[in-house]
Image (cartoon, rainbow, N blue to C red):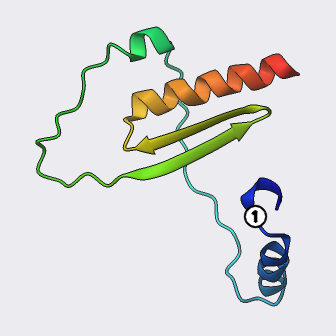
Amino acid sequence: MEHGLNTNLLFKWRRAYQAGQYEPPTLLPVEVVHEERTIENAAVLPAQSQSKAHPVVAGVIGVSVGVARVRIEGTPDAATLRVVLRTLRAAAEAET
C-alpha cells in the first residue's frame, strides 16, 4: 500500500475514468505569491481570534516531499502554510 493508497482502488478509478464515468480534469486558477517569510517570524504572527462568528472546521493536511513529511492538524492560516510549503520546497531542492 504505497503512499497510503490501495493499488486495486487506483486501478478501479483508472478503469472508471477510461470508461468515461468521470469528467475530464480541469485546471484551477493559482496565484503565486513571492513573499519572504521565515519560520522564525511566522511564530510572531498574531494569533487569530477564536471568537469570530464563523465556526472553525478542523482538518488534516499531509504533505510529503522527498524524505520530508509534514502533518498539519486544525486550521492553519495562509501565512503558516506558505512557510511550511516554502521550507519543504527548499528541503526538496537541497536533496537534488
Residue at the (56%, 40%) spot, across then down: 71
The location of residue 46, given as percent across then percent down, is 25, 20
For residue 37, say whether it is visible.
Answer: no
Quadrant (top left/top right/bottom left/bottom right) for the N terminus: bottom right
For residue 50, say whether it is visible.
Answer: yes
Task: Name the residue at the front extreme.
Answer: 1
Residue at the (57%, 56%) spot, across then down: 28
Q: Observer-nearest residue: 2 or 25?
A: 2
Task: Name the residue at the right extreme.
Answer: 96
Determine whether, in the image, residue 23 is placed left or right of residue 31: right
- The amino acid pointed to by label 1 is Leu
Question: Relative to 11, is 2 above or below?
Answer: above
Residue at the (51%, 24%) spot, across then down: 83
Q: Observer-nearest residue: 63 or 6?
A: 6
Question: Relative to 16, is 83 above or below?
Answer: above
The location of residue 54, given as percent across then percent down, is 17, 53
Quadrant of residue 26 within the rendered picture: bottom right
Quadrant of residue 90 within the rendered picture: top right
Q: Observer-nearest residue: 56 or 28?
A: 56
How many marks overall? 1
Mark 1 highlights which residue? 5
Quadrant (top left/top right/bottom left/bottom right) for the C terminus: top right
Question: Relative to 40, is 86 above or below?
Answer: below
Instruction: Give neighbour class at mark 1: few <14, some 14-19, many 20+ (Cα, 10 Å).
Output: few
The location of residue 17, given as percent across then percent down, is 78, 81
Give SS at disc 1. loop
Q: Observer-nearest residue: 31 or 72?
A: 72
Determine whether, in the image, residue 58 is placed left or right of residue 54: right
Residue at the (37%, 35%) spot, across then down: 77
Determine whether, in the image, residue 87 is placed left or right of residue 2: left
